[in-house]
Amino acid sequence: MKESRIIYLDNAATTRPIKALETLMTEYREDKWYNPSALYKGSSEAEADMAAVRKTLLDAVGGYDRQAVFTASGSEANNMAIFDAVKPRESCHFVFSAYEHAAVYACAKMLMDSGHEVTFVAPDERGVVSAKSVTDAIKGNTVLVGVMHVNNETGALNDIDDIAAGVKAAKKDVHFHSDGVQAFLKVPYSLSGHVDSYAVSAHKIGALKGTGALLIKNGAKLRPIILGGSQEKGMRAGTENTFGIAAFGCAVENFPADDAHIFELHHRLIAGFGKLEKVVVNSPTGDGLYSPYIVNASVLGVRSETLLHALEAKGIYIGIGSACSSKTRTNRIHDALKLSPERGESAVRISFSHENTAEDVDTLLETIDSEARFLRMFTRR
């Protein structure tokens, strides 16, 4: 018996690897499995392949004055940039948005535990971070400012160029870092000279888990947080994941350039939510304020986890926030967005890929409507 098609709408957590990776895997199994640090021909070719992918990543964001340091994840890339800014034997000040991904927030907590000062800047009433709120937080000992490009739970799109320019005007030697994991290729963007480092991840765009990169300015030399060999110009020890890196490049080259389809799905979902009973959209919806790939909404009267499993039973997969924190009971992001307890406990995240269809959205809306009506019958009043 043929199984019914799964409707996967949790692409902010991870994406299905693209079909082209099957052919690529055969190439790496047969001919391209060598260690790029060795001295024979196969290794030199592996190193050249990695160099080509570095260029592919940088070209995708206009990073002509940049270098790409390969990592095992976007989380590691964020960690590298943040901890490199620490000045030994000095008390440093850091500024982050209040709704950063756990990969950045956990770094901030560790910095505070180590005696450094951290200021968290809340998003405004639209759900985005303003340049003024960030620059107002800068102090004489501020060493790094980190503001994510696209929020992983709401899709809020921050103008990181404007924010970074304000930061540099306030204190030119402050390092400006942005977590670009949910933005890379999904919003039109070219890195400005004010952005010092930018983290990206492969498995969010149809490549594989276990590969990321930090895009930093040419000539920058980071203190490694993983010690060992001299790979990645001494900034990240460990034999490079050559297949994962090649897959990253392949996914970039094959990523659809036209977002019209995603915008259509986004608008269809927002309009559909507007017709449902007791559903409130938490994501920004104004022009220039959001990525179309992510929509966050509260289905009032139904706990998010309960709705997630009810939809899963129907073959529909959605999220209830960052996959890195969805198993915890934290409300940090909801608090930053000033969501009421009722909206916070019923918030769900729908995130698209180019594989999704208008029919997927319509089925989701119909199923949420029917399941929510049923589940509200059991809600305590």
Image: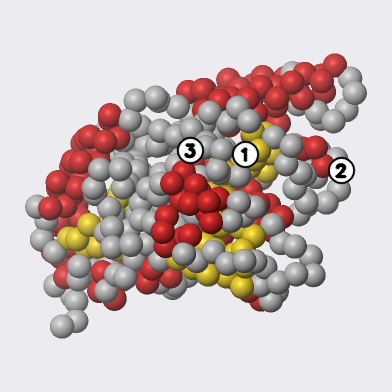
Q: Is residue 272 left or right of residue 196?
A: left
- Lower sequence index among marks 1 and 3: 3
Residue type at the position of mark 3: Phe
Quadrant that contains the N terminus? top left
What residue did someone put label 3 on?
Answer: 184
Residue type at the position of mark 1: Leu
Please state which of the two labelled residues, at mark 2 or mark 1, is closer to the viewer.
1
Task: Give the Cα separation between the discs numbered 2 and 1.
Answer: 21 Å
Residue type at the position of mark 2: Gly
Q: Secondary structure at mark 2?
A: loop
**Residue 242: horizontal and vertical position, in percent?**
71, 31
Q: Is residue 176 left or right of residue 255?
A: right
Please state which of the two labelled residues, at mark 1 or mark 3, is closer to the viewer.
1
Out of 271 and 367, give the one closest to the viewer. 271
Residue lying at 32% horizontally and 58% vertically, measured from the top left: 127
Q: Is residue 322 above or below residue 303?
A: above
The label number, if any, that marks residue 215 in the structure image: 1
Q: Secondary structure at mark 1?
A: strand
Out of 18 and 290, give the one closest to the viewer. 290
Residue lying at 55% horizontally and 43% vertically, measured from the top left: 194
Could you tell me if residue 69 is visible in this image?
A: yes
What residue did someone put label 2 on?
Answer: 229
Task: Give the Cα separation between the discs numbered 1 and 3.
Answer: 11 Å
